[in-house]
Image: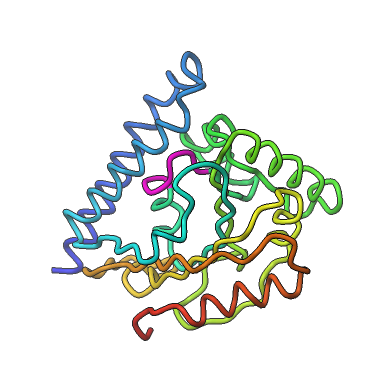
Amino acid sequence: MIFLRSVLFNLYFFLLTFVLGISGFGVRWFARGQALAYAQFWARLLLGGLRWICGIYPVLIGEENLPPAGPVLIASQHQSAYDTLVWLTLLPRPTYVMKRELVKIPFFGPLTPLAGMILVDRAGGAAALRGLLAETRRAVAEGRQIVIFPEGTRTRPGERRALQPGVAAMAAAARLPVVPVATDSGRLWGKNAFFKRPGPIHLVVCPSLPAGLPREALLAGIQAAWDAAPLPSP
């Protein structure tokens, strides 16, 4: 049954992405200001299909730790493609920090800068960092909710990886507290995994870390919050 559900969802994923990707040309040409809303619509349909076909659904814990509106910097664990979709459905105006190469993905890639995503050239050195901080200030001025994955790549449940320091530079530039978020998405939809197993994906929004923390203290605080989050064992 899990195999069949996974096949059906993959078919749904590619068909929906193809159809909305073709329709996205209209957004790119005639309604550029609607790119974020269009991406959110796509994510809601995908996660709705994931719930219906595979029985995977989100459980948000600690929602009171998110500001009700305005800018915020969210430092989330990253275990699954699910993590890159779910915040599009949970936040009013999300902005992801993304690899610049993702713009090359057919159909939806070119929509990412129009949707206000922050694109980072990881090999760009100091110039890339300056661009990241300028884009961070722009997102804050627009009242966006910034989502960054400090691990830098998808990790398996229970795996530890040194956190990238970019989140600390962004926090200093934005003058915002950082909200750590722990997840167990990899239990049900693993890294590069074909199978999607039914059940809840937990998202634990931890208490925010204050603005102005030194880099090492901030990174240690994020990791400590993740470690202490009440998640099921991997």
Question: Can you give x and y, in whole percent of width and height, for residue 94 in the image?
Answer: 50, 43
Q: Nearer the viewer, residue 67 or 54?
A: 67
Residue occupying image coordinates x 53% and y 41% = 70
The answer to whether 104 is drawn above or below residue 164 in the figure is above
Farthest residue in the left direction? 1
Residue 32 in magenta stretch: no
Q: Nearer the viewer, residue 2 or 213?
A: 213
Q: Is residue 6 left or right of residue 184?
A: left
Q: Is residue 173 left or right of residue 220?
A: right
Write down the quadrant of residue 208 in the picture: bottom right
Residue stretch in magenta = 88-94
The answer to whether 81 is drawn above or below residue 106 in the figure is below
The answer to whether 166 is drawn above or below residue 32 in the figure is below
Question: Can you give x and y, in whole percent of width and height, for residue 40 in the image?
Answer: 39, 38
Residue 92 in magenta stretch: yes
Q: Nearer the viewer, residue 214 or 197?
A: 214
Residue occupying image coordinates x 34% and y 68% = 202
Task: Locate the C terminus and report the quarter of the image it occupies.
Answer: bottom left
Write down the quadrant of residue 185 in the picture: bottom left
Residue occupying image coordinates x 58% and y 40% = 117
Q: Is residue 18 left or right of residue 168?
A: left
Question: Can you give x and y, in whole percent of width and height, for residue 129 in the image?
Answer: 79, 50
Residue occupying image coordinates x 39% and y 59% = 63
Write down the quadrant of residue 1 in the picture: bottom left
Question: Can you give x and y, in whole percent of width and height, for residue 219 in the image?
Answer: 68, 72
Q: Nearer the viewer, residue 168 or 47?
A: 168
